[in-house]
Image (tube, helix red, strand yellow):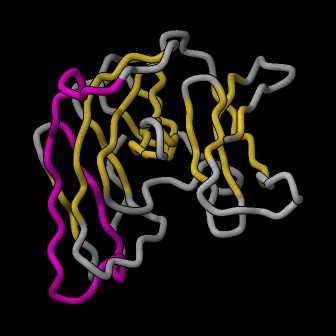
């Protein structure tokens, strides 16, 4: 239950509860990144049903940071045996939502580490922003649902809002999204706006 090694030239950011390994090339040479702990309870956002906010942080990356995947995560002092999800706070025209990025499992030592498979999992930590760590009220596994959202003309559109349960996704440039649903769910109900 330890942070995986960071490629040569990478950076480790650490705050009170969080430790992030940023791979080389995720931000320009000489750029600085900052990791800041936040109180999950201080958000002026309504938390979705089925989850509890346990921690939060801001990850500030320098201008020109390309993003990408491969950020290693380690969260300390969590409740052993629980399942958690790291989500980025996303905004559309009307409201804020939580886009799931990473599923975590908390071991006996209270350290939350990724339980994403090598292929087919969530995108992982892929850039800066405000993030919330949620503990799932029912600790059942969550599975990834992917798709392409299209407008009434059948054209994939960037920035469409897709929701399922407590999760929100904004579609990418190709209209693609990914969300989580409980593994025991036979059908998923999605709302696209």
Q: In which quarter of the image is residue 61?
A: bottom left
Q: Which of 43 and 193 is in front in this view?
A: 193
Instruction: Where is residue 120? Give x, y as percent.
Output: 71, 52
Residue 31 is inside the magenta segment: yes
Instruction: Where is residue 171? Give x, y as percent.
Output: 63, 55
Instruction: Where is residue 152? Give x, y as percent.
Output: 85, 52
Q: Is residue 84 above or below residue 118?
A: above
Q: Is residue 73 above or below residue 104?
A: below
- Range of residues picked out in magenta: 17-45
- Kindly give the residue lying farthest to the top in the view shown: 138
- Kindly give the residue lying farthest to the left in the view shown: 16
State which quarter of the image contains the N terminus.
top left
Residue 131 is inside the magenta segment: no
Instruction: Where is residue 112? Give x, y as percent.
Output: 36, 33
Q: Nearer the viewer, residue 14 or 54?
A: 54
Q: How many numbered discs, if any?
A: 0
Q: Is residue 18 above or below residue 165?
A: below
Question: Residue, x 28% and y 38% (percent of image)?
Answer: 75
Question: Residue, x 28% and y 55% (percent of image)?
Answer: 20
Question: Residue, x 39% and y 42% (percent of image)?
Answer: 89
Asked whether, in this view, residue 77 is left or right of residue 193, the answer is left
Q: Nearer the viewer, residue 97 or 67?
A: 97
Asked whether, in this view, residue 183 is left or right of residue 6, the answer is right
Question: Residue, x 50% and y 42% (percent of image)?
Answer: 99
Q: Quadrant of residue 193?
A: top right
């Amino acid at each position: 239950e330890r942070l995986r090694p960071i490629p040569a030239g990478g950076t480790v950011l650490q705050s009170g509860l969080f430790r992030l390994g940023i791979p080389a090339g995720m931000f320009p040479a000489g750029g600085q990144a900052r990791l800041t702990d936040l109180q999950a309870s201080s958000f002026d956002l309504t938390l979705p049903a089925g989850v509890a906010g346990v921690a939060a942080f801001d990850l500030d990356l320098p201008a020109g940071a390309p993003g990408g995947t491969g950020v290693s995560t380690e969260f300390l002092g969590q409740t052993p045996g629980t399942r958690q999800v790291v989500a980025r706070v996303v905004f559309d025209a009307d409201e804020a939502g939580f886009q799931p990025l990473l599923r975590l499992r908390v071991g006996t030592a209270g350290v939350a580490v990724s339980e994403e498979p090598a292929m087919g999992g969530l995108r992982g930590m892929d850039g800066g922003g405000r993030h919330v760590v949620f503990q799932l009220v029912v600790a059942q596994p969550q599975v990834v649902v992917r798709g392409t959202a299209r407008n009434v003309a059948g054209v994939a559109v960037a920035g469409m809002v897709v929701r399922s349960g407590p999760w929100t996704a904004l579609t990418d440039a190709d209209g693609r999204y990914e969300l989580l649903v409980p593994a025991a769910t036979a059908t998923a109900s999605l709302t696209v706006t």
